[in-house]
Image (cartoon, rainbow, N blue to C red):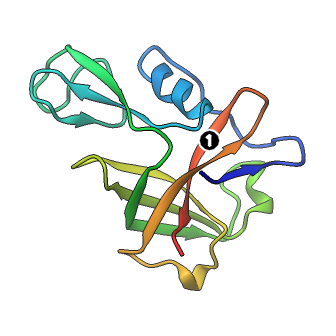
Amino acid sequence: MSIEKTSSKYEKPIPLKTIDNKPYWDAADQHELAIQSCEDCKRAIHPPGPACPHCGSPTIEWINYGSDVTGTIYSFVMTYVPMLPGFQHDLPTIIAQVEVDQMEGVRITANLINAAPEEVAIGKAVKMTWIDITEDRALPQWALMK
């Protein structure tokens, strides 16, 4: 498991926990990935919500996939202008949508960290990592697999 520690005060917005996404963020805070699954149609659900977007069932469960999460870059964008305050130190910011190996049909969008722009390409293998942004909050991110 790869963990990156921040050495200065975190300046970016911190995602809020809601009734629908609390288990996702609680798992992320433990450096693990939890994804909703429909108990009726058995399909993965992401982003989380109150019911299955595939069949409409409100019968959902959370499955913990642990900390060994891999995938391939499905799409990405690079920004050279800060999107919000706090992002000015991360330019260019590379945001990747990743097809997760462990869950058919699930794509998770997060920053791709520690990668040079010329290294990034659709189809490249990545691994989920977490950045501790406060003492009790962590953000899932992606890193290229070497």
Residue ID at (49%, 59%) = 127
Q: Is residue 95 above or below residue 141?
A: below
Q: Position of residue 59 (x, y in %)?
A: 20, 14
Side of 85 relative to 116 (left or right): right
Q: Nearer the viewer, residue 112 or 62?
A: 62
Side of 83 relative to 26 (left or right): right
Q: Nearer the viewer, residue 140 or 95?
A: 140
Q: Nearer the viewer, residue 23 or 63?
A: 63
| Residue 2 location, quadrant | bottom right
Q: Position of residue 92 (x, y in %)?
A: 67, 70
Side of 123 relative to 81 (left or right): left
Q: Residues within 10 Å of mark 1 (few under 14, many from 20)?
A: many
Side of 72 relative to 39 (left or right): right
> Which residue is the site of mark 1?
139
Q: Is residue 87 above or below residue 55?
A: below
Q: Position of residue 46 (x, y in %)?
A: 33, 37
Farthest-out residue, right: 8
Residue ID at (69%, 66%) = 81
Q: How many numbered dots are placed on residues in this image?
A: 1
Residue ID at (88%, 48%) = 7
Three-letter code for the amino acid on which mark 1 is drawn: Leu
Residue ID at (69%, 37%) = 13
Q: Is residue 145 above or below residue 138?
A: below
Q: Position of residue 56 (x, y in %)?
A: 13, 22
Which secondary structure lies at badge 1? strand
| Residue 98 location, quadrant | bottom left
Q: Quadrant of the C terminus?
A: bottom right
